[in-house]
Each structure stands twice: as structure tokens, then as C-alpha cells.
């Protein structure tokens, strides 16, 4: 069974294993939220940080409130979604509303696609968003294909790519459900 949840202590060990896996098989597309998990030694500290970000407490200049969601398959952490509650001009070009990461051992099974659908449902039901922007580096073919597949299922459109810090950024708007 696949579910998307706020971080829960019962998945902490599995999350830590996912971080170890990420460190062992890094990609140029690893998301900041996943990398940030490396700095926490206890679930309590991690959860407080996630809650502060969700509530918009103590954010750095230019940052927006965001919710960290864990993708869980059969009681095991397999990925993370970072859902930004709003968009800045910067996020409209790079970053969008949703960033995601699937651990290496769980890739190529459609989990990113299914997780993104669940994330869109969360964005609608909890955040009241009618659509979300998902972006990726044009070289990240797997993510680009995932975005397009979900867009075709839930409806939406592809925006013109933009050049951002000397790289092309693909941008897809997806209707929430």
C-alpha cells in the first residue's frame, strides 16, 4: 500500500536508511529537503523543523511555508515530497510548488508518479491549491516524464521552459484533485 504522510516517528529508522542510501548514490537532482534530513540526530528535532517550515516560523528571507510529506510503501519510507504553499517569482522559474525525491532502491516503479498524484490531492484538500507548478532541470529526464504523465492524468499544461542559472528548467502546471 502506498500513502503520503506527515513525518511520523514510526518511520524514522526507515527514513534514516533512506538518507544513507541517498548519500551512497547521490544525484545532481537531490532535493534540499532530503539533504537537510542529514543534519538531524533525533526525530523530535526533525519534526520541530518540519512543523516550523509548515507554519512559516523562522523562515529565511525569500522562503515560503512548505510541508514535508513522506511517501510510505508497505510501512517503509521510499520518498519525500516538499510542498510549497505559495510561489515567489524565483519559485515560478525554478522549484515550483512541489519537489520530490525517491530513494534509489525504489526508483523505476512509478512511485514518483503515484506520489505526485497523492501530493496533488493533499495540495487541494489541505492547502486549497487548485493547481501546482512542478519544475525540473531539462537534463532530469525521469522527473520530466513523471511530471508529464501526472499532468496528462490530472489535467494541466506545460509552460514554456526558462533558462535559469545557465540551465533550462522545464515547468508543468498540474490541476489538483
Image (cartoon, helix red, strand yellow):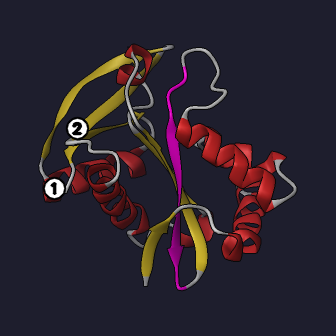
Residue 117 is situated, as x and y percent measured from the top left of the image, at 30, 60
- Residue 69 painted magenta: yes
Rendered residue at 87%/55% (across/down): 41
Please report contact status of discs 2 and 1: CB closer than 8 Å, yes or no. Answer: no
Residue range (magenta): 63-74
Quadrant location of the C terminus in the rendered image: bottom left
Quadrant location of the N terminus in the rendered image: bottom left
Rendered residue at 61%/64% (across/down): 104
Residue 135 is situated, as x and y percent measured from the top left of the image, at 37, 35
> What is the C-alpha distance between the residues marked 2 and 1?
10 Å
Residue identifier under label 1: 154
**Residue 24 visible from this viewpoint:** yes
Q: Nearer the viewer, residue 40 or 54?
A: 54
Q: Which mark is residue 99?
A: none
Query: At numbered mark 1, what does the secondary structure look like: helix, strand or loop?
Result: helix
Image side of residue 68 versus residue 115, left or right: right
Q: Nearer the viewer, residue 151 or 55?
A: 55
Q: Nearer the viewer, residue 71 or 20?
A: 71
Residue identifier under label 2: 173
Image side of residue 44 versus residue 79, left or right: right
Q: How many marks?
A: 2
Rendered residue at 50%/39% (across/down): 66
Rendered view: 38 above or below 97: below
Query: At numbered mark 2, what does the secondary structure look like: helix, strand or loop?
Result: strand
Amino acid at each position: 500500500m502506498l500513502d503520503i504522510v506527515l513525518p511520523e516517528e514510526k518511520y524514522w529508522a526507515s527514513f534514516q536508511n533512506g538518507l544513507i542510501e541517498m548519500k551512497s548514490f547521490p544525484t545532481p537532482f537531490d532535493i534540499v529537503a532530503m539533504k537537510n534530513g542529514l543534519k538531524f540526530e533525533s526525530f523530535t528535532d526533525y519534526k520541530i523543523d518540519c512543523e516550523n517550515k509548515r507554519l512559516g516560523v523562522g523562515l529565511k528571507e525569500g522562503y515560503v511555508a512548505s510541508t514535508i510529506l513522506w511517501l510510505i510503501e508497505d510501512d517503509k519510507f521510499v520518498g519525500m515530497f516538499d510542498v510549497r504553499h505559495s510561489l515567489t517569482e524565483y519559485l515560478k522559474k525554478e522549484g515550483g510548488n512541489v519537489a520530490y525525491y525517491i530513494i534509489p532502491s525504489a526508483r523505476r516503479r512509478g512511485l514518483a508518479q503515484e506520489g505526485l498524484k497523492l501530493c496533488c490531492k493533499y495540495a487541494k484538500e489541505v492547502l486549497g491549491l487548485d493547481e501546482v507548478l512542478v519544475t525540473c532541470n531539462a537534463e532530469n529526464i525521469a522527473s520530466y516524464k513523471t511530471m508529464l504523465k501526472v499532468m496528462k492524468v490530472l489535467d494541466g499544461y506545460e509552460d514554456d521552459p526558462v533558462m535559469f542559472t545557465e540551465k533550462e528548467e522545464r515547468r508543468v502546471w498540474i490541476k489538483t484533485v
